[in-house]
Image (cartoon, rainbow, N blue to C red):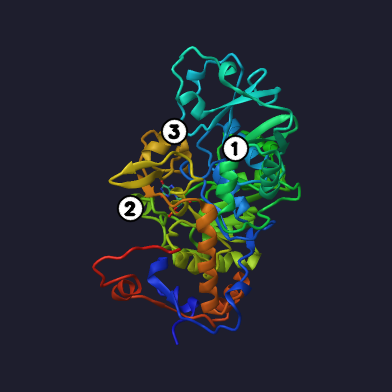
């Protein structure tokens, strides 16, 4: 009944996730017996197969802390200066809670009015010299200055002074911080690392996160810190960028290119493996067996798969190259598995079914942009449009992002004319990833149960042994598989 993947994907068609459907198999275990633990790259294990994309509207330190707390991983984008990117890595590694308020440090004499033009700033910490490393004197909350009419007021005039018991060590987890706040009856606490205040954690934030599904231990490295990745390019200047990132403690680097099979990337992989043998390097993007072979031979510890499948991508239209994502994931994984190199299915994920398909077709993780971009943890503030609460989401090959500096992912070194390979748009507010990713993973587990696969390895084995069968869905079958025939409906997954 149905087709084996080997037969289905060798008929000259480029299939996307929606084109194909698995036939159910046999269930002999409960949903909770399904394990989604996996590998991101040769030496990095994750308990949740989710990775956030290195895009400037998706992954900065806030998203990366949340992804690590969920057992996944965030890849910090490189559309910033190398020191800024390295700071984002440090920020992830300087806490063990998925909370980030990016406090600003000022000296007592600073004028209050100058502090609060940034909407997202909750609080200013007043320290002796105005740096994170000097003695903390007090703090001023946003509400303190909003009601202020005296434009000449200094922070020192309005600050709440702190006693000595206002900070906890950086590696306190949520339960420890919660207990401390209750015990001390404080509204907030400072996280301190080696004499430096790294963040301010408010009671409100702790209460918010406590209301989400319970978190496991997260993705923690051998140093006891959360693991985090970062994207780099393949130019000479990226070797310097990499130095900054390595010093900051980055755990894995992703070579960010839409067509990874190039002499530049192969040389960069070799350089990294020679200079930092302990650091895992993920190559890509690739969609063919030939590209895969080349990057594995060069020494890639992981591969990112997808070309033009992303929601904001126009690469296939502009350059006429790419591949349907289901076919690409299957083809690349079938070669990469022989060398034990894990594959990241990058782009085109818009529901939990797509994740089940990507992971069953051979990927070890999925990388997501639009799926995460509307979350609390994505960079940028929410806006309102036609009654919807939205966040901006843009392709890194869009003119807007390239103007900020991401052009090397899409341009040759000498290109003078910029051609966009992506668009700028917006996505709907989805709330916190700490809430919707656990629900999404539960849905993925149910999909695995229907397939009779209790782990990613077992799904891959069932596919390769031709036990799992698939079919292509006709246009009408796809319509039938979605919600249809209703005058209106409310789409709510949980
Ligand atoms: P999703 O579908 O998750 O896709 O939003 C995210 C992935 O899309 C890729 N990406 C781009 N591809 N032009 C492209 O052709 C772009 O401007 C662009 N920006 C991101 C990238 O692989 C990302 O992870």
Give the Cα separation between the discs numbered 2 and 3. 23 Å
Q: Residues within 10 Å of mark 3 (few under 14, many from 20)?
A: few
In the foreground, 486 or 84: 486
Task: Nearest to the eye among marks 2 and 3: give it.
Answer: 3
Badge 1 marks a residue whose secondary structure is helix
Q: Name the residue rendered at 36%, 35% in the picture.
A: 417
Q: Name the residue rendered at 33%, 48% in the picture.
A: 388
In the foreground, 147 or 95: 147
Residue 361 rendering spot, x and y as whole percentages: 52, 70
Picture quadrant where residue 325 is located? bottom left
Residue 182 rendering spot, x and y as whole percentages: 67, 43
Considering only vertical position in the picture, is 436 above or below 14?
Answer: above
Sequence order check, earlier mark of 1 and 3: 1
Q: Which residue is mark 3?
A: 404
Q: Quadrant of the C terminus?
A: bottom left
Q: Which residue is mark 2?
A: 317
Pointer 2 and pointer 3: residues touching (CB < 8 Å)?
no
Q: Which residue is mark 1?
A: 88
Picture quadrant where residue 109 is located? top right
Badge 2 marks a residue whose secondary structure is helix
In the foreground, 110 or 428: 110
Q: Quadrant of the N terminus?
A: bottom left
Q: Residues within 10 Å of mark 1 (few under 14, many from 20)?
A: many
Considering only vertical position in the picture, is 112 above or below 59?
Answer: above
Which mark, by number, is residue 315?
Answer: none
Residue 63 rendering spot, x and y as whole percentages: 54, 46
Task: Classify mark 2 as within 8 Å of ligand 1 or not, answering yes or no.
Answer: no
303 relative position to 319: left or right: right
Task: Classify mark 1 as within 8 Å of ligand 1 or not, answering yes or no.
Answer: no
Task: Classify mark 3 as within 8 Å of ligand 1 or not, answering yes or no.
Answer: no
């Amino acid at each position: 009944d149905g087709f084996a993947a080997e037969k289905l994907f060798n008929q000259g068609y480029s299939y996307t996730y929606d084109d194909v459907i698995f036939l159910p198999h046999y269930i002999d275990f409960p949903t909770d017996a399904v394990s989604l633990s996996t590998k991101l790259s040769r030496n990095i294990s994750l308990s949740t197969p989710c990775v956030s994309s290195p895009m400037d509207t998706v992954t900065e330190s806030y998203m990366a802390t949340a992804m690590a707390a969920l057992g996944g991983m965030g890849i910090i984008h490189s559309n910033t200066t190398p020191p800024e990117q390295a700071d984002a890595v440090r920020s992830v590694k300087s806490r063990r809670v998925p909370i980030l308020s990016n406090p600003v440090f000022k000296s007592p004499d600073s004028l209050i009015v100058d502090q609060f033009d940034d909407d997202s700033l909750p609080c200013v910490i007043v320290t002796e010299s105005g740096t994170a490393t000097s003695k903390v004197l007090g703090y001023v909350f946003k509400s303190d200055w909003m009601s202020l009419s005296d434009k000449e007021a200094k922070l020192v005039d309005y600050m709440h002074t702190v006693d000595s018991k206002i900070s906890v060590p950086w590696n306190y987890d949520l339960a420890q911080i919660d207990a401390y706040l209750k015990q001390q009856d404080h509204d907030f606490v400072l996280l301190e690392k080696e004499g430096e205040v790294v963040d301010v954690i408010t009671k409100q934030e702790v209460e918010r996160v406590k209301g989400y599904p319970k978190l496991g231990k997260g993705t923690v490295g051998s140093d006891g810190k959360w693991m985090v990745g970062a994207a780099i390019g393949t130019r000479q200047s990226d070797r310097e960028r990499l130095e900054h990132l390595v010093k900051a403690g980055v755990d894995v680097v992703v070579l960010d290119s839409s067509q990874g099979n190039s002499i530049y990337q192969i040389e960069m992989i070799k350089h990294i493996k020679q200079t930092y043998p302990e650091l895992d390097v993920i190559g890509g993007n690739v969609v063919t067996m030939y590209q895969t072979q080349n990057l594995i031979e060069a020494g890639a510890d992981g591969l990112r798969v997808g070309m033009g499948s992303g929601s904001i991508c126009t690469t296939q239209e502009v350059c006429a190259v790419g591949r349907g994502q289901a076919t690409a994931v299957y083809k690349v994984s079938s070669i990469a598995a022989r060398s034990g190199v894990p594959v990241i299915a990058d782009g085109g994920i818009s529901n939990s079914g797509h994740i089940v398909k990507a992971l069953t077709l051979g990927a070890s993780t999925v990388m997501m942009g639009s799926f995460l971009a509307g979350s609390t943890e994505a960079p940028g503030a929410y806006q309102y449009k036609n009654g919807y609460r939205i966040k901006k989401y843009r392709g890194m090959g869009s003119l807007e992002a390239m103007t900020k500096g991401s052009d090397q992912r899409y341009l040759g070194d000498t290109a003078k004319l910029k051609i966009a390979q992506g668009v700028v748009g917006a996505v709907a507010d989805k709330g916190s990833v700490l809430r919707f990713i656990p629900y999404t993973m539960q849905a993925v587990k149910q999909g695995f149960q229907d397939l009779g696969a209790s782990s990613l390895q077992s799904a891959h084995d069932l596919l390769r042994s031709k036990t799992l069968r698939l079919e292509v869905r006709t246009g009408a079958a796809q319509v039938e598989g979605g919600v249809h025939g209703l005058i209106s409906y409310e789409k709510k997954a949980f």
